[in-house]
Image (cartoon, rainbow, N blue to C red):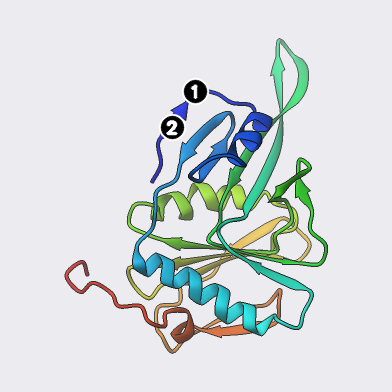
Amino acid sequence: MFQANRPHYNVEEYLWQEQRAEQKNEYYDGTIYSMAGGSVEHSQLQSNIILEIGSVLRDRDCRVLTSDLKIGVGVAEETKARGTARPKKSKDFITYPDASIICGPLEYYRGDRYTIANPQVLFEVLSPSTRNYETGFKLEQYQKIPALKAYIMIDSQQVWVRSCLRIGEQNRWVLEEPLENLTDTLRLEVLQIDIPLSLLYAKIEFDQSES
């Protein structure tokens, strides 16, 4: 999915350079990673998410935003040496989700107007090369976003949609059972909406040879 370009950048350098970059790059704890392009199925699923959910939320104070928008995650960690606590170090993770839903005022990550800190729902479309990354590392990172209520993973190679939901006001996350039939419906409780999988997977033609 990506490859490292350089050993270390601070987050301010990354944000400055990313505004001027010719391609999208992710950032994690000092390293910048190039992002690869997606398949036709990947692009179609992104479009379906934006169109279907955007139409449902059209008259509400919510935005359904594309993968051109960066989302920032900052986690402060306190290190210790010889029994003495050192100042907390922030491990920044900045990425481009396939779709983001933000309701209410926007909050900018580290004051950067191209990076948002308060999505309520995030979507990632899985491909063979990114499945483990997005169901593992990204899932773990996204759970650190205080405003986030749901992370939705959608497979581009088969009918498969799985939700990771924050339960109540506590920092407790639950992985729902995957939805695997076009007759199923994705329930986004945080938004009080239902999206049929048949709409999310509209115009998707799976490669039978791969299955």
Residue at image position (47%, 53%) is: 134
In this view, which residue lies farthest toward the left? Answer: 209
Residue at image position (74%, 72%) is: 62
Residue at image position (71%, 73%) is: 190
Locate residue 201, reporting x and y percent: 42, 79
Label 2 CA crowd tier, 10 Å (few <14, some 14–19, many 20+)? some
**Kind of residue at disc 2:** Ala
Say if 113 sits above or below 200 in the image. above
Return the mark for residue 107.
none
Quadrant placement of the C terminus = bottom left
In this view, which residue lies farthest toward the bottom? Answer: 183
Is there a contact, CB below 8 Å, between mark 2 and mark 1?
yes
Q: Which residue is mark 2?
A: 4
Q: Which residue is mark 1?
A: 7
Q: Examine the rendering and report whether any part of residue 156 can be seen.
A: no
Q: For this view, does 181 lie left or right of residue 86?
A: left
Locate residue 193, reporting x and y percent: 66, 83
Residue at image position (52%, 34%) is: 32
**Kind of residue at disc 1:** Pro
Q: For this view, does 205 lie left or right of residue 6?
A: left
Q: Examine the rendering and report whether any part of residue 189 can be seen.
A: yes
Label 1 CA crowd tier, 10 Å (few <14, some 14–19, many 20+)? few
Mark 2, secondary structure of its residue: strand
Q: For this view, does 187 lie left or right of residue 118?
A: left
Between 113 and 30, the residue placed more toward the observer is 113
What is the quadrant of residue 58 in the picture? bottom right
